[in-house]
Image (cartoon, helix red, strand yellow):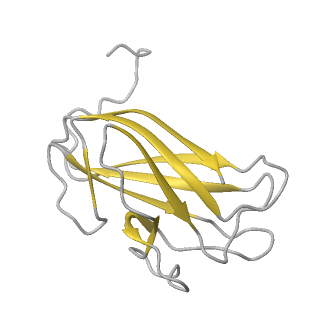
């Protein structure tokens, strides 16, 4: 991989690697639900307390404090949503069965919490240093 001279070289870094992505609600109204669309290769999504390795990654989403004082902890996209349980890291947000395909779509909810127009949610991908898979595309569709 090429980059500008003086870029930091992280190739020898060890431990869990964490990637973040922000998605803005620009629908014009408040949203509690979204579809998470991903295209992966050589990657298996595991629960947030699962083992990370060359293939396994954990993905969580968070609604930061909004203008209406809504917020959630880091919610596990693979764990089923339970009403009223969005305040502890590792609580679930999945609605329905988890789609394990390489081109997956999984519906998620924040329950009674919502992202207002022009507010955002954060997606976190946690991988092991040995992860060799890839996530080629991540997008959301507000429901």
Query: Residue 62, image x and y in percent?
Result: 54, 64
Q: In which quarter of the view is residue 33 placed?
A: bottom right
Q: Residue at image x 40%, y 21%?
A: 6
- The foreground one among 132 and 137 is 137
User: Is 55 on the left or on the right of 81, as rendered?
Assistant: left
Q: In which quarter of the view is residue 38 placed?
A: top left
Q: Is residue 44 above or below residue 68?
A: above
Please give the count of numbered marks on the rendered protein: 0
Q: Is residue 11 above or below residue 70?
A: above
Query: Residue 116, image x and y in percent?
Result: 78, 61
Q: Residue at image x 26%, y 69%?
A: 49
User: Is 9 on the left or on the right of 12, as rendered?
Assistant: right
Query: Residue 57, image x and y in percent?
Result: 27, 51
- The foreground one among 10 and 78 is 78
On the rendered image, what quadrant is the C terminus found in? bottom right
Q: Residue at image x 15%, y 50%?
A: 53
Q: Is residue 83 above or below residue 60?
A: below
Q: Residue at image x 38%, y 73%?
A: 90
Q: In which quarter of the view is residue 80 placed?
A: bottom left
> In the image as oriented, which residue stretches furthest toward the right?
28
Q: Is residue 63 above or below residue 55?
A: below
């Amino acid at each position: 991989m090429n980059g500008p001279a003086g870029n930091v070289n992280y190739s020898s870094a060890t431990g869990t690697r964490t990637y973040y992505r922000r998605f803005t609600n620009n629908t014009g109204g408040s949203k509690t639900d979204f579809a998470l669309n991903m295209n992966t290769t050589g990657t298996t999504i595991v629960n947030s307390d699962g083992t990370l390795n060359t293939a396994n990654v954990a993905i969580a989403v968070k609604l930061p404090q909004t203008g209406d004082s809504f917020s959630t902890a880091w919610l596990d996209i693979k764990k089923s949503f339970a009403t009223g349980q969005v305040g502890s890291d590792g609580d679930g947000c999945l609605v329905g069965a988890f789609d394990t395909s390489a081109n997956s779509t999984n519906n998620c909810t924040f329950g009674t919490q919502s992202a207002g127009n022009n507010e955002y949610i954060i997606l976190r991908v946690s991988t092991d240093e040995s992860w060799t898979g890839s996530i080629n595309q991540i997008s959301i569709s507000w429901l």
